[in-house]
Image (cartoon, rainbow, N blue to C red):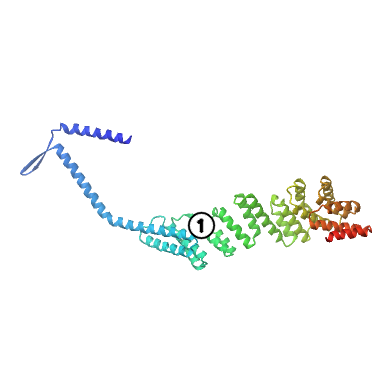
């Protein structure tokens, strides 16, 4: 379409020129005493057009001639820029290939080339970013070579370059994140956290920064801060649900184990989310720790209630190890109260055993509860059934020991000896 329009315009111009010049009888007389020159209007127009073309070509030629030095400087600057880019790309390739010494040399050459380019006055706008990346590549290679002095010097240069006008904000943030990672590799969590604190408000909540903060908090033993960071990472879906649950469970277990008294343990337990407090492993660990610290048995039973409900509601998915631990903790609680046990819990245990008569673990727990209450006959019946069906060695041994004690109490030496033999086995 464009070619057709150009062709139509060309024909229209030719027609207009033919109409104007075809019947043009005008003349132009030039007087140059003592001469007189008569020229046609058409010739004068042609001479003027030719003169204009000649003048234009002359001016263009002179402009191109005077432009040659600047073009030469620009070409040299482009060659330096391309050489700098090539060196930086080579440094990155060598670094990814694990050839750190070659990567450092190539990056240092890129830094030198960039300095020459900046001094020439023909540097492109992205020279600042190029300089920062080159220094950061040198620092990365030096860190891999365990050269801390060179690494720190080039890191400082990279941060200075990233702080200049025109540099992207991401350059400084990336340099700080790399510095924090290096500090973690050297087991210096305080330095890593200090670098992370230098990040802007938005950058320190990114997934990469939160991962580094989590590692630093764990290395420094700041479990509460690590827990908050892990929750943020889980909220941002930085881990799979299973991995996030395992990580939070491990941190909470460390926090529980680090409690030095019952008050500190209750405070740590209160800081956990309801979903975290419902985790069987955490509840059992906290209950055992509270008992070891001499805490209130009623509080232990309160912490164990969600675990007990989960065991009864989902018996197939409840782990056998958690079941055995729950029974042991409840047994210790019943023994520690002095009273046969809390009546409400005794009712729960009895109702659960009656609802699941084939569950050996509940038979054992109900039997021990009856033993504490002085119901010898029912205790012997339940413990006798549980001792032959329990899979946990510790619970089975305790059941036979309790049966041996009951047999000795009623004077049945043969039954007591058999029970002691089975307990020893």
Left or right: 235, with 365 as reference point: left
Quarter that holds the N terminus: top left
Whether residue 155 is visible? no
Using the image, determine if residue 190 lies above or below residue 52. below
- Image coordinates of residue 393 in percent, x first then y, are 79, 57
Q: Quadrant of residue 82?
A: bottom left
Left or right: 260, with 124 as reference point: right
The residue carrying mark 1 is 174
Q: How many marks?
A: 1
Q: Residue at x 22, y 48 (%)?
A: 57
Quarter that holds the C terminus: bottom right
- Considering the numbered disc 1 on the image, is that residue within a helix, a strand or a loop? helix
Q: Residue at x 71, y 52 (%)?
A: 277
Left or right: 349, with 414 as reference point: left
- Image coordinates of residue 351 in percent, x first then y, are 83, 46
- Image coordinates of residue 37 in percent, x first then y, are 9, 41
Q: Quadrant of residue 297?
A: bottom right
Looking at this rendering, what residue extends furthest in the left direction? Answer: 34
Q: Residue at x 57, y 63 (%)?
A: 185
Mark 1 Cα within 10 Å, few/some/many (few <14, many 20+)? Answer: some
- Image coordinates of residue 69 in percent, x first then y, are 28, 57
Looking at this rendering, what residue extends furthest in the right direction? Answer: 411
Whether residue 215 is visible? yes
Nearest the viewer among 263 and 122 is: 122
Nearest the viewer among 167 and 285 is: 285
């Amino acid at each position: 379409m464009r070619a057709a329009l150009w062709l139509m315009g060309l024909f229209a111009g030719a027609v207009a020129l033919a109409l104007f010049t075809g019947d043009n009888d005008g003349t132009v007389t030039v007087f140059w005493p003592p001469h007189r020159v008569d020229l046609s209007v058409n010739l004068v127009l042609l001479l003027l057009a030719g003169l204009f073309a000649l003048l234009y070509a002359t001016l263009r030629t002179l402009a191109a001639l005077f432009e040659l030095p600047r073009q030469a400087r620009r070409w040299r600057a482009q060659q330096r820029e391309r050489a700098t880019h090539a060196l930086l790309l080579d440094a990155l390739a060598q670094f990814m290939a694990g050839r750190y010494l070659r990567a450092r040399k190539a990056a240092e050459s890129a830094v030198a080339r960039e300095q020459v380019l900046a001094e020439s006055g023909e540097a492109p706008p992205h020279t600042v970013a190029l300089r920062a990346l080159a220094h950061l590549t040198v620092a990365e290679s030096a860190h891999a070579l365990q050269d801390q002095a060179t690494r720190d010097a080039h890191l400082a240069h990279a941060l200075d370059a990233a702080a200049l006008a025109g540099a992207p904000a991401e350059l400084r943030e990336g340099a700080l994140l790399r510095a924090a990672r290096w500090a973690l590799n050297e087991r210096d969590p305080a330095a890593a956290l200090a670098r992370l604190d230098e990040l802007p408000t938005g950058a320190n909540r990114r997934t990469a920064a939160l991962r580094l903060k989590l590692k630093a908090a764990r290395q420094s033993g700041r479990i509460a801060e690590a827990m908050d960071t892990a929750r943020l990472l889980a909220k941002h879906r930085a881990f799979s649900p299973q991995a996030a649950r395992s990580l939070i469970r491990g941190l909470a277990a460390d926090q529980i184990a680090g409690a030095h008294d019952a008050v500190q343990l209750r405070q740590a337990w209160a800081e956990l989310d309801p979903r975290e407090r419902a985790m069987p492993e955490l509840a059992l660990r906290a209950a055992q720790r509270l008992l070891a610290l001499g805490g209130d048995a009623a509080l232990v039973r309160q912490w164990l209630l969600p675990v007990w409900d989960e065991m009864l509601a989902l018996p197939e998915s409840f782990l056998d190890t958690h079941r055995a631990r729950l029974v042991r903790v409840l047994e210790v609680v019943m023994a520690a109260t002095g009273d046969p046990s809390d009546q409400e819990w005794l009712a729960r245990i009895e109702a659960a055993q009656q609802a699941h008569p084939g569950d050996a673990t509940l038979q054992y727990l109900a039997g021990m509860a009856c033993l504490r209450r002085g119901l010898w006959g029912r205790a012997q019946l339940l413990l006798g059934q549980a001792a032959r069906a329990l899979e946990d060695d510790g619970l089975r041994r305790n059941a036979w020991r309790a049966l041996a004690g009951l047999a000795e109490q009623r004077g049945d030496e043969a039954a007591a000896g058999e029970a002691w033999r089975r307990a020893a086995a």
